[in-house]
Amino acid sequence: MAEIRTIGVLGAGQMGGGIAQVAAAASYDVVLADATIELAQKGKAKVDAILGKQVEKGKITADQKNAVVDRIKPVGGPADFSNCDLVIEAATEQVDLKLKLFQACDAAMKPGAILASNTSSISLTKLAGVTKRPELVIGMHFMNPPPLMKLVEIVRAVQTSDATYAATKAAAEKMGKTTTTSKDAPGFLVNRILIPMLSEACFALQEGVGTPEDIDTGAKLGLNHPMGPLELSDLIGLDTVLFIAEVLHRDLGDDKYRPPTLLRNLVAAGWLGKKKGRGFYRYDDKGQKIAGGAT
Ligand SMILES: NC(=O)c1ccc[n+]([C@@H]2O[C@H](COP(=O)([O-])OP(=O)(O)OC[C@H]3O[C@@H](n4cnc5c(N)ncnc54)[C@H](O)[C@@H]3O)[C@@H](O)[C@H]2O)c1
């Protein structure tokens, strides 16, 4: 298998932008795409702004920041991935969209290149099945935010070859990450544990057992969690949390995974969490939680 030098990232949102940053910081050349080149450019600008703050704080030099940002090249779409040795898809968590994007990436990519997805819950075996390179398809599940979180959960599709697994693990490690490995099962390992807890916090809120602050403070100080479950849901994005809960409920066939009505309603209202300025809490323009701003 060829050495990985150039990494394509598809989807320049909160995860894709972070993955592009982490890959560029590990000296990979990065080709960043979204639905339009303007969105890819916006993703790159966000990386520039995030690293700019680190320069202001004296954590990195301006030259170090520029070296990372300059390695990220925004492009118009998957057709520009022909030179990539590895593509990491990080577009919106919708199965039909990802199936379509996987076919587009597969058609554009060179033989032998690896096609990974950052999906939180969609079957890698299913995604691999719509490509002509199923043995080169794998899950590379970064945690949010990718620059800060140490883990990459690697998910092996039924078709994933040992060589693809080894090369993907090595690339994640070069990006400074520790990996765990999961078989391709609903929610993999991390979300199988996490999502029922996030849903339970939402059920407790829905039933009026406590306020959002009671619930989050309880988890932080009582369970030693760095974030409470409702603020973590807002960070992940309530659309993403709902989608994963629906996958777990449907594919494991157990009602313990059913999503709460309150979660469905917040998503239907477009209150998707921090990225929209409102979810369980309200956020100002800078993404800071507004005190007393529970929804
Ligand atoms: N949010 C999290 O905490 C988290 C954690 C781990 C994994 N993930 C996974 O990462 C992926 C992205 O999630 P996110 O939180 O970054 O979402 P996001 O909404 O911030 O970003 C999604 C991006 O996909 C883009 N997109 C939509 N349609 C597209 C198309 N046709 N072609 C190219 N790009 C397109 C959107 O424009 C957007 O920039 C999902 O699969 C999600 O399950 C999310």
Image: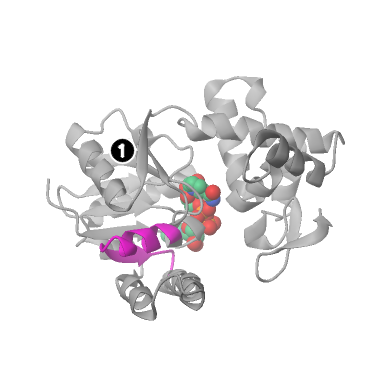
Residue furthest to the left in view is 2
Q: Which residues are magenta?
A: 18-36
Residue 82, how many percent across, how many down?
21, 61
Please state which of residues 100 and 72 is positioned toward the viewer in this rendering: 72
**274 lies left or right of 172:** right
Residue type of the residue flagged with mark 1? Ala
Residue 64, how many percent across, how many down?
34, 74
Q: Is residue 157 above or below residue 96?
A: above
Q: Is residue 93 above or below residue 37?
A: above
> Which residue is pictured at 21% across the width and 43% down the height?
167
Please state which of residues 165 and 87 is positioned toward the viewer in this rendering: 165
The reply to whether residue 241 is in sight is yes
> Which residue is pictured at 81% across the width and 38% down the height?
205
Magenta stretch encompasses residue 199: no
Residue furthest to the top in view is 254
Q: In which quadrant of the rendered image does the N terminus lie?
A: top left
Q: Is residue 21 above or below residue 120?
A: below
> Which residue is pictured at 54% across the width and 22% down the height?
252
Q: Secondary structure at mark 1?
A: helix
Residue 249, how many percent across, how many down?
60, 27
Residue that badge 1 annotates:
128
Q: Residues within 10 Å of mark 1 (few under 14, many from 20)?
A: many
Magenta stretch encompasses residue 20: yes
**251 lies left or right of 7:** right
**62 lies left or right of 271:** left
The reply to whether residue 93 is in sight is no
